[in-house]
Image (cartoon, rainbow, N blue to C red):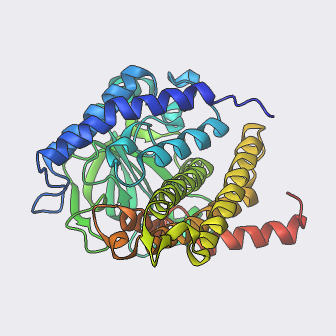
Amino acid sequence: MRNDPCQSEVEGLTAFLRAEVFPRQHALRDAGVAMYDDQGHLSPEVLVAFSGVRRASASAGFYTMLLAEELGGGGLGFEALFRLWETLFDVCGAEYWLGHQAISHWSRGPSHLYQLMNADFRDEVYPRLMSGELTTCFALSEPDAGSDIWRLRTVAERVDGGWLLNGTKQWSTNAPYADWCLVFVVTDRDAFSQHRGGVTGFIVNMRAEGVLLESVIRMFGHAGGDEGIISFQDAFVPDRQVIGEPGQGLTYAMSGISTGRLYNSARAIGLAKWAVSKALDYAEVRTTFGGLLIENQAISFPLADAAMEIHAAHLMGLDTARALDEGRQARAEVSMTKTYSIEIAIRAIDHAIQVHGAMGLTNELHLTEAWQQLRRTRIADGSSEMMRIQVVKALRRDGINF
């Protein structure tokens, strides 16, 4: 049997979630705290709880354990990333959503992009990101530019001492709550029109003059949300807040793509495990027509199918993570893993809902929230269709060579 290099971290994270996250979640529930306020923002109590989890996790050494050592993190690699996020979503499911703050996501907290930033500026902001006090959002997509990145319209013009940003960004996760925004805009129209770059990255204060959160994007009938629309209206950004070299922003923006897609794969597998476990527990005690549900093959066989698919997705994820740890790009493998993991997880959660009957649709079980999370993720970070395009490109170039 292969030695598990992440076992101690998995056990430590699990213990942290049960000791620190579960009681905080129970306290919010017992106090009757609403998730969102009247404007669709997360309520102040929830935001305080989020910050509390991040800070506690940072103090315990979990929050930044996936960050590179040269940036002050734990230096764990892609296999650890996959295993730890899978564990987190398996333990917390969609029920203990406070726990989703326990590990820093690269677009919400400290990340490899800070190596490219002005040292003085980084020293001012970075420690507060590492401690979990501050968060960021990532702004690349626009109303007319999603998968087709060459339709970006937000621009920055050079002025004395910095840049003026103008345009609109959409689908920016954590935008309603972030302190800083990692935004990527067109700065060289000629290069951009020829698909030769021309995009520059900036880190922008979300409370700076000319930066406006236009709205919270609400989905699935929810009262609020985590996504936002940001507009920039002659927003001045000083030179010290440029990310890396001007014109190279697309390279930087896409540098976290494998991290994001592997994260979403782990998230899907963890939620699928959590949902199937709930269905198994229920099927073992629910009696209908004189027997247990689990004894009915119409119930048990789909659960067996779900388990087989979860196992296959888990192994795909591990293989892809190890390839990335070896320094390979593994673009096809990342695309296959994300697509397969999410699609099998949606099926698994749908069957877990069906096993519970009408109870499966209730807010109490949180299964529909898990389904909604993954239905969004079929589009986010590269849609399933875009992932299949990447796989086909790899097949045409290299054949079956995984």
Q: Residue at x 35, y 29 (%)?
A: 19
Q: Is residue 125 visible?
A: no
Q: Nearer the viewer, residue 21 or 319?
A: 21
Q: Residue at x 69, y 62 (%)?
A: 308
- Is 381 on the left or on the right of 15, as rendered? right
| Vertical order, 319 against 385 (above or below) | above
Q: Residue at x 29, y 69 (%)?
A: 362
Residue 169 location in percent, x, y?
36, 63
Report how many numbered discs are placed on residues in the image: 0
Q: Quadrant of the N terminus?
A: top right
- Is 176 on the left or on the right of 19, as rendered? left
Q: Nearer the viewer, residue 138 or 341?
A: 341
Q: Quadrant of the C terminus?
A: bottom right
Q: Is residue 80 visible?
A: yes
Q: Residue at x 81, y 66 (%)?
A: 394
Q: Nearer the viewer, residue 297 or 263?
A: 297
Residue 16 location in percent, x, y?
41, 29
Residue 317 location in percent, x, y?
68, 51
In the picture as drawn, the residue positioned furthest to the front comes out as 290
- Is 49 on the left or on the right of 159, as rendered? left
Q: Nearer the viewer, residue 255 or 363?
A: 363
